[in-house]
Image (spheres, rainbow, N blue to C red):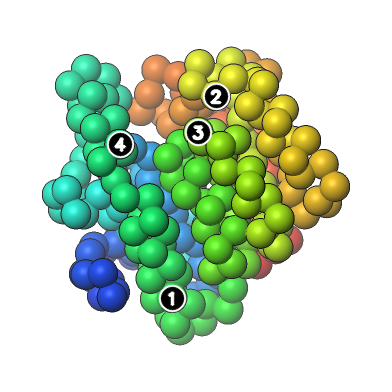
């Protein structure tokens, strides 16, 4: 993959924080605000950023946990898992949304970026949903966004196209929750939901034991088509 990546600093009203920037060859393209899982902007998230940059997108992944420690990187089992859950529970979600908005503002101001989407995984999937509801992106994609079903009071705030991916075998997000989300957006033709029958939570992450190659490939295909149509 021929990309150019580096960490940059984003200055906001709530403080300064880092974000991982990955540029496509040529340096220009539609923008993606990439939103982390609870494990930080770790190697997997940076790989995802570089992957979408190779597809021609300008990708910016903010360090959402910066208030608790800069550039925290965690694995997926044992003490790292426990620490990740602690970080998620200690995060002020309103401030996290403000950080995403600040990131989106910086991304929009970059040369050659004409439209932007948010793309989030797990915790970031929920954050991507709220980012769409906040109206700061032109489209949003959400992978196994735990907690979206608890934010359906914001369904009417969704005015942009949204794509959601869920695994039918997800041990963190029951199918009843997915059904409630689908029902809330039944009349909204801009919201597209895919459920992958053999997929567990985290099925996109090839660093995790729950990685499911076929589901990840299918979801990525849907996401690329979605982004190409909306940006």
Q: Which residue is mark 2?
A: 173
Q: Eyeballing the image, is 83 above or below 41?
A: above
Observer-side mark, 1 or 4, equals: 4
Which of these two is toward me, 151 or 32? 151
Q: Which residue is mark 1?
A: 105
Q: Which residue is mark 4?
A: 89
Dot 1 and dot 4 residues touching (CB under 8 Å): no
Dot 3 and dot 2 residues touching (CB under 8 Å): yes
Q: Secondary structure at mark 3?
A: loop
Q: Earlier in the sequence, mark 4 or mark 2?
A: 4
Dot 4 and dot 3 residues touching (CB under 8 Å): no
Q: Which residue is mark 3?
A: 146
- Give the residue displayed 28% in from the left and 75% down from the top: 13
Q: Eyeballing the image, is 28 above or below 210?
A: below
Q: Earlier in the sequence, mark 1 or mark 4?
A: 4
The reply, left or right, for residue 219 in relation to residue 61 is right
Real-space Cα distance between discs 1 and 2? 31 Å
Real-space Cα distance between discs 4 and 2? 17 Å
- Give the residue displayed 43% in from the left and 31% down from the top: 205
Quick one: label 2, few (<14), some, or many (20+) residues within 10 Å?
A: many
Residue 129 place in picture, x, y as percent: 56, 50
Residue 105 place in picture, x, y as percent: 43, 75
Q: Secondary structure at mark 4?
A: helix
Dot 1 and dot 2 residues touching (CB under 8 Å): no
- Give the residue displayed 29% in from the left and 62% down from the top: 19
């Amino acid at each position: 993959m021929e990309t150019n990546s580096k960490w940059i600093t984003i200055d906001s009203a709530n403080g300064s924080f880092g974000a991982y920037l990955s540029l496509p060859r040529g340096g220009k393209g539609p923008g993606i605000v990439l939103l982390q899982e609870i494990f930080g902007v770790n190697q997997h998230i940076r790989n995802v950023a570089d992957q979408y940059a190779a597809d021609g997108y300008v990708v910016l992944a903010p360090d959402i946990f910066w208030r608790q420690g800069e550039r925290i990187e965690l694995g997926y089992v044992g003490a790292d898992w426990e620490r990740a859950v602690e970080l998620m529970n200690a995060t002020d979600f309103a401030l996290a949304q403000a950080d995403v908005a600040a990131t989106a503002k910086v991304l929009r101001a970059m040369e050659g970026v004409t439209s932007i989407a948010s793309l989030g995984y797990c915790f970031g999937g929920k954050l991507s949903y709220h980012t769409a509801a906040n109206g700061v992106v032109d489209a949003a994609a959400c992978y196994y966004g735990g907690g979206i079903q608890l934010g359906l009071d914001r369904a009417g705030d969704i005015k942009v196209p949204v794509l959601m991916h869920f695994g039918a075998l997800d041990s963190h997000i029951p199918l009843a929750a997915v059904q409630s989300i689908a029902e809330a957006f039944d009349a909204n033709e801009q919201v597209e939901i895919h459920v992958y029958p053999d997929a567990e939570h985290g099925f996109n992450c090839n660093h995790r034991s729950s990685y499911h190659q076929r589901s990840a490939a299918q979801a990525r295909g849907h996401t690329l088509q979605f982004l190409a149509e909306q940006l």
